[in-house]
Image: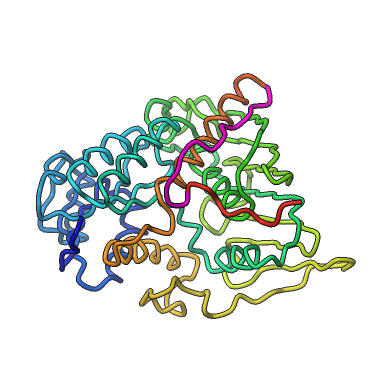
Amino acid sequence: MSTTPDPLNVALIGCGAIALQNHLPGLALCPNVRLEALCDTDPARLEAARQQTGAPQVTRDYRELIERDDIHAVIIATPNVTHAPIALAAVAHGKHVLCEKPLAMNAEEAWTMARAAEKAGVRHMTAFTYRFVPAMRYLAHLVRRGDLGTVYHFRACRLQDWGRRGLGWRQVRALAGTGELGDMLSHRIDFAHLLVGRIRRLVAHWRRWHEERGGQPNELDEWVAVLADFDNGATGVWESSKLATGHNESWRAPDTVELNGSDATFLYETRQWNTLRLGRPGGSHLETLEVPREFWKWPGSPRDPLQGDPLVTFRYDQIWEFVDAIRQQRPCAVTFHDGALVQEVMDAVVQSAESRQWVELPRPAHTGPAAHPTPAAAP
């Protein structure tokens, strides 16, 4: 788009919990932004969202929205299988797009989305929400500054307790593609790209214990683990589970990243949004490192970081970044390219888990904003 309309009219496609809890308050932060339309295939959910938001237009067919000239941007919060067709149709009509993760069902779809958005000249963003946690932003800053030194190890662990409760479409292979891998581990793969760089090869294992959830068939993984080598020689370990009994099922459950380097160790935990833990060479313990106040919210965001639950409100900055990128006609901080890179790793995890073998990652063949993550110092 060559001009930025004012007000900016946004359509929300998919009206589930993520859309209403994360995206709706984010839109409310942004001046001269109007939630113009809602779309959902479930009539009851659509009506509940209409009553909550007061959006003037509702439909069960996303095509009715993307073909309208008065819709300038769309947020896609639908089952994974629909991400690519909706996004491709939207960018073909010149709409800016923010899409939930995982971006697509496979890397080929994801790169098709990225190339189409670039060709159309629209803003495109993958919803890797945890990039906006103040402590993660500060950790990325410290790594880029060189405080870690030569990177040795990356490890990430996400533990939740979902028991046997139903996950809806997220337990159906045809709709979600993968289970815990796409739902939670995708974020932690993105952390690795942000903090360390490209993954060279990996081996993975996954398990499903419950054949049914909520009385319906459960087809997808509930636990996944990955061991990897990065291009720069660092090693990586990931574990993510929905069956860590007693650990809660929300954002308050354990979610950690640790980086070990020649000059420092950094330990991040989402629950500790304004602190990191720092280990120094020869030290006997990790000390607390406060996150400076300038990292408590995204640059330019009008959000008051002292208002509301800080484990919730950081998510609103994601929409602010999307809207600001549209207005400034610049790339989003997190693009479809980031989503496609993660999808490449997810595809390799699936291949490895099914074959029980090491898998080499594709060599860089794609270009575009954020297509080549900035690595920590290489050995």
Q: Position of residue 151 (x, y in %)?
A: 74, 54
Between 356 and 72, the one lying in front of the other is 72
Image: magenta residue range:
357-370
Q: Nearer the viewer, residue 32 or 36?
A: 32
Check if residue 365 falls in the magenta segment: yes
**Residue shown at 63%/61% (left/top)?**
269
Give the image location of residue 91, x and y in percent: 24, 44
Q: Determine whether 163 is above or below 25 in the image.
A: above
Magenta stretch secondary structure, dominant: loop
Magenta highlight on residue 312 = no
Residue 165: % across, % down: 48, 39
Q: How is the image coloured?
A: rainbow
* Residue at 38% from the left image edge and 75% from the top image edge: 300
- Name the side, left or right, on which 218 lies relative to 78: right
Q: Is residue 135 left or right of residue 16?
A: right
Q: Going 61% across and 35% down the picture, which residue do you hit?
A: 224
Task: Please report the residue visible at 17 percent of the width from the left and 58 percent of the height from the top.
Answer: 51
| The N terminus: image quadrant | bottom left
Residue 346 position, x and y percent, is: 53, 35
What residue occupies the far top of the structure in this picture? 355
In this rendering, the count of numbered labels is 0
| 304 lies above or below 93 | below
Q: Determine whether, in the image, residue 147 is placed left or right of residue 100.
A: right
